[in-house]
Image: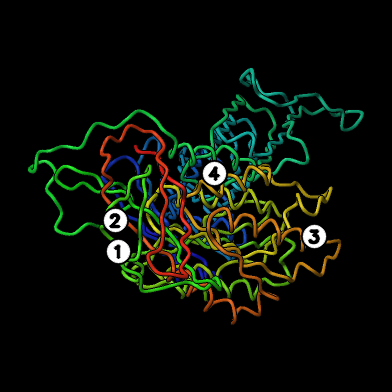
């Protein structure tokens, strides 16, 4: 079986996609279109829409984080032939058309990445949508409609010539349904969600039907691995991330059986979790060292650090910087307030990615269209990451900067306590809480809560503050800078002002030097009873004129 693909595709599709179709010995033949796009990149690219025309069967759409677009074709009474289904592509659309010569009912299963939209037309076949879909236009004459989507993130609108034969809405469903007189002779049945205009949503589903059989709506949560997050998820996401550091059930004492836990020949404190020796556990601290002028101090060794835990001095087993990996998360503010700087923003992202060493991992996040996007998770694949940066579009929207910072930390960095983690925020800092614009939705998380959380995070926050926001006047830029300075100080990071995104040459070497002054310092505490309680820790420098900044302690879990 082969599929026909149009010749008008873009270079992106020609390079990234290929069609693979193979015949099976079962009553159905599977055809799969593989599109080599990162799922998160797809959420930011210009809309990719899948057009589906299936007059004689049903269509099921499953949305997930898999970057591939796949189609499964199933026949009811006979095997599928090469002429039954044609798949073509145009500039920004993929077209799936079922045209069996004998009207054989064909069912389609579409598996699409988050960020794709669909247009589906059937006659009497059911249409199902499952997951966080960007957009859907569904048209059927008498088919069933089943939508299992996150209600808080999805607008749903349906118009039908007749009310569905069965309407299934859970008790907590927040929808209205009415008969609407559109003309003196015509009445339609209408269903609408009750989401307020000020709520940030991601998806929009429009349904048009004649005499549908069943309408079933099911509320589904936004998956934890979704490459898009809504700003109103920030409070819960941050609380969940920080809860992992709070005391819980004490862990059992470490094993003393050398066969069960052999002693490592060399400690690896950058591994994140406590490292086992034969009978003791290691604690890893991340500290910054600066001189009297605030400049980073490099080339310190274990003898240059003194650690006091609960009033008792500890022996430092390891201290390193150059040979310890970093987890760098870069957050790009692509909201409306930074739109004039967009091209330079992409170039800045490339330059920050280039700061990373081969042993470092880099993640790229973006605030765009009021929504937090995971463009790339932590990776050491620089080539793929830079290619993704080149695809960032000129999007805009509101500026829930504080929500984006909270979501950026909660995405991955919190999973690596004890490692060297840094969050670089490239923004003018003008959150909607600062500008207080009635047309924009402010961050859900309050700044005071975020500032308190910054002191609890296992990450240093380095805002690259763009003074280009001064063009708005009204004191917004000055207030935004003070707040970013507060976040940086609370996390033991540092703010780096830049006249504009085009003027990063003075900033980049400063950040590179700053990162070299971040150390991983490890020791085996004399108190090996890890009972979940808080332990105060003080880290001092053995060299005069050197200041050490570190978290004031840890939970002995």
Residue sitting nearer the eye, 263 or 120: 263
Is label 4 in a helix, a strand or a loop?
strand
Distance, label 3 to label 1, CA atoms, is 44 Å
Residue that sits furthest to the bottom in the current view: 505
Q: Position of residue 24 (x, y in %)?
A: 28, 47
Is label 2 in a helix, a strand or a loop?
helix
Q: Which mark is residue 269?
A: 2
Q: Would you name the residue on which mark 4 appears?
A: 54
Q: Position of residue 156 (x, y in %)?
A: 68, 36
Q: Position of residue 58 (x, y in %)?
A: 51, 37
Distance, label 4 to label 2, CA atoms, is 57 Å
Q: Would you name the residue on which mark 1 appears?
A: 302
Q: Would you name the residue on which mark 3 appears?
A: 476
* Residue 418 appears left or right of 144: left
Mark 3 / mark 2, whichever is N-terminal = 2
Distance, label 3 to label 2, CA atoms, is 42 Å
């Amino acid at each position: 079986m082969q599929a026909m693909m149009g010749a008008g595709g873009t270079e992106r599709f020609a390079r990234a996609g290929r069609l693979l179709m193979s015949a099976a010995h079962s009553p159905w033949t599977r055809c799969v279109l593989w599109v080599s796009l990162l799922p998160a990149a797809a959420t930011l690219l210009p809309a990719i829409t899948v057009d589906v025309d299936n007059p004689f069967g049903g269509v099921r759409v499953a949305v997930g984080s898999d970057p591939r677009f796949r189609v499964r074709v199933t026949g009811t009474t006979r095997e599928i032939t090469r002429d039954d289904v044609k798949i073509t592509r145009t500039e920004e659309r993929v077209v799936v058309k079922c045209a069996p010569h004998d009207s054989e009912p064909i069912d389609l299963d579409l598996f699409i990445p988050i960020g794709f939209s669909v247009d589906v037309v059937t006659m009497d076949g059911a249409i199902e949508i499952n997951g966080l879909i960007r957009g859907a236009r569904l048209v059927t004459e008498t088919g069933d409609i089943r939508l299992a989507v996150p209600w808080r993130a999805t607008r749903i609108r349906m118009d039908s010539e007749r009310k569905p034969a069965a309407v299934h809405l859970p008790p907590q469903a927040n929808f209205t349904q009415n008969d609407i007189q559109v003309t003196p002779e015509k009445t339609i049945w209408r269903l609408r969600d009750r989401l307020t205009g000020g709520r940030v949503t991601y998806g929009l589903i429009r349904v048009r039907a004649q005499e549908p059989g069943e309408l079933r709506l099911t509320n589904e949560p936004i998956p934890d691995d979704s490459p898009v997050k809504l700003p109103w998820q920030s409070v819960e996401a941050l609380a969940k991330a920080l809860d992992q550091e709070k005391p819980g059930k004490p862990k059992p004492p470490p094993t003393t059986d050398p066969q069960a836990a052999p002693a490592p020949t060399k400690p690896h404190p950058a591994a994140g979790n406590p490292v086992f020796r034969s009978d003791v556990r290691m604690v890893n601290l991340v500290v910054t060292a600066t001189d009297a002028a605030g400049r980073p101090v490099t080339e310190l060794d274990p003898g240059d650090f003194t650690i006091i835990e609960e009033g008792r001095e500890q022996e430092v087993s390891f201290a390193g910087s150059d040979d310890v990996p970093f987890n760098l998360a870069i957050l790009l503010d692509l909201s409306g307030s930074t739109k004039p700087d967009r091209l330079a923003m992409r170039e800045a992202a490339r330059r920050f990615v280039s700061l990373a060493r081969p042993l470092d991992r880099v993640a790229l996040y973006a605030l765009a269209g009021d929504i937090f996007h995971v463009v790339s998770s932590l990776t050491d694949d620089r080539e793929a990451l830079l290619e993704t940066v080149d695809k960032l579009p000129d999007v805009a929207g509101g500026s829930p900067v504080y929500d984006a910072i909270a979501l950026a930390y909660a995405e991955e960095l919190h999973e690596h306590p004890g490692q060297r983690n840094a969050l670089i925020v490239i923004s003018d800092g003008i959150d909607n809480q600062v500008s207080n614009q009635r047309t924009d939705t402010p961050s859900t998380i309050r700044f005071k809560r975020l500032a308190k959380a910054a002191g609890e995070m296992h990450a240093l926050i380095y805002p690259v503050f763009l003074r280009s926001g001064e063009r708005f006047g009204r004191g917004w830029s000055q207030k935004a800078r003070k707040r970013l300075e507060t976040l940086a100080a609370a996390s033991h990071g540092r703010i780096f002002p830049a006249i504009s995104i085009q003027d990063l040459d003075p900033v980049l070497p400063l950040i590179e030097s700053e990162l070299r002054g971040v150390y991983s310092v490890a020791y085996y505490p004399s108190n090996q009873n890890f009972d979940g309680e808080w332990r105060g820790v003080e880290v001092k420098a053995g060299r005069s004129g050197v200041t050490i900044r570190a978290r004031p302690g840890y939970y002995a879990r």
